[in-house]
Amino acid sequence: MTADLSPLERLTRAIHLQEVDRPPCICPGGMMNMVVEDVMDLTKRPWPQAHLTGEAMAELASGHYPNGGFENYGVPFCMTVEAQSMGAPVSMGDRIHEPRVTSYVIDRSQDWDRLTPIDPSSGRALEVCRAISILKSRGTEVPVIANLTGPVSLATSLVDPAVFYKDIRKNPSHVEGLMNRVTEELIRFGRAQLEAGADVLTISDPSGTGEILGPKAFETFAIPYLNRILDSLAPLAKGTIVHICGRLKGVAHLLGDLHCDCISFDSISSARDIASHVEGKSLMGNVSTLAIETAAPGQLRLLCQSSLNQGIHVLAPACGIGAMTALDQVRTMVDVAKNNRRA
């Protein structure tokens, strides 16, 4: 392919394993935060203020692409919007630290009926949807990515993870009730983001890993709920991405059961190994975020090229990048993608 694709066309085609002019280079948002201090300075929209209004969120999210950074817009910039909407108290962080949940809403998994429903027409959930609408109104060239916290990660933001993981073994029916509830809330919020104009949906579930859950619980308490979200929202999206953190060796054989188009994973996992288990799905990642922040440009280039050589279709950080990462490091990643043109 010789014709240049738009960033949106390139990403959606890459996600669906269709021919592209070159790999896209993105960072979706949400848990996989794309914001760095350099972009805050360029847009004059710093954290934590930019977490609070749709206008500021949109301005900050749009700061990468025109300045040689990631080839997408992604909001929000953390994984606390859903938990806060369901009643969790949240500290909004500061210029370099993301918002975080400060205490749990419920003491037991079976108390899920005490949780507040997510209302996409109020609070930060509304501001995320407003940011998406603003970004989409500026044109269709750059993909706007909706983000959801994965169901296990949301559940363990609402109840103590130690309680949750114990209940998986001792009281699985209580966990099922909680997971059903958070899944329905995530579908509601995801639908609102996509109806606001988002092109692609990313779900990131850092607490729902095979390392933490083990293969059996991953199969029982992660995959079915992720798939329920995907099945509900995929018809509204141009593509779906699921990010799973940690070492995937113990659950790699289960990844093909996910109903997403693209799987994103950590730098600790090999793209070649993952590819052998997920035929028909594209791969995203998996450049170390530590390397993106601290490696010399030449070393970072080698790492990016290695990911592409191993079969990565969408070049991206392996997780959210630190806010102190230099924009020039992101530009290096994008440059590697641009230098991998397809004949």
Image (spheres, grey):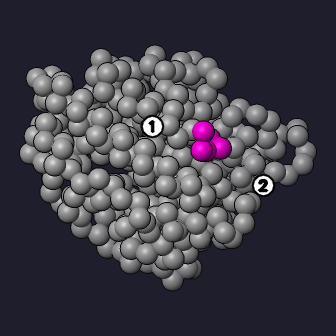
Q: Is residue 119 left or right of residue 34?
A: left
Residue 314, percent from left and from top: 63, 42
Which image quarter: residue 15? top right
**Element at badge 1?**
helix
Residue pictured at 35% horizontal, 29% vertical: 222
Residue 34, percent from left and from top: 50, 60
Q: Give 146 or 61, whichever is nearer the viewer.
A: 146
Q: Is residue 234 left or right of residue 289?
A: right
User: Which label belongs to residue 6?
Assistant: 2
- Residue 277 lies, with reference to residue 102, above or below; the image says above
Q: Which residue is mark 1?
A: 229
| Placement of the N terminus among the 4 image quadrants | top right
Residue 259, percent from left and from top: 52, 28
The number of discs equals: 2
Mark whose residue sits in front, 2 or 1: 1
Q: Is residue 293 visible?
A: no
Tell me which amino acid carries mark 2. Answer: Ser
- Residue 16 lies, with reference to residue 59, above or below; the image says above
Mark 2 or mark 1: which comes first in sequence?
2
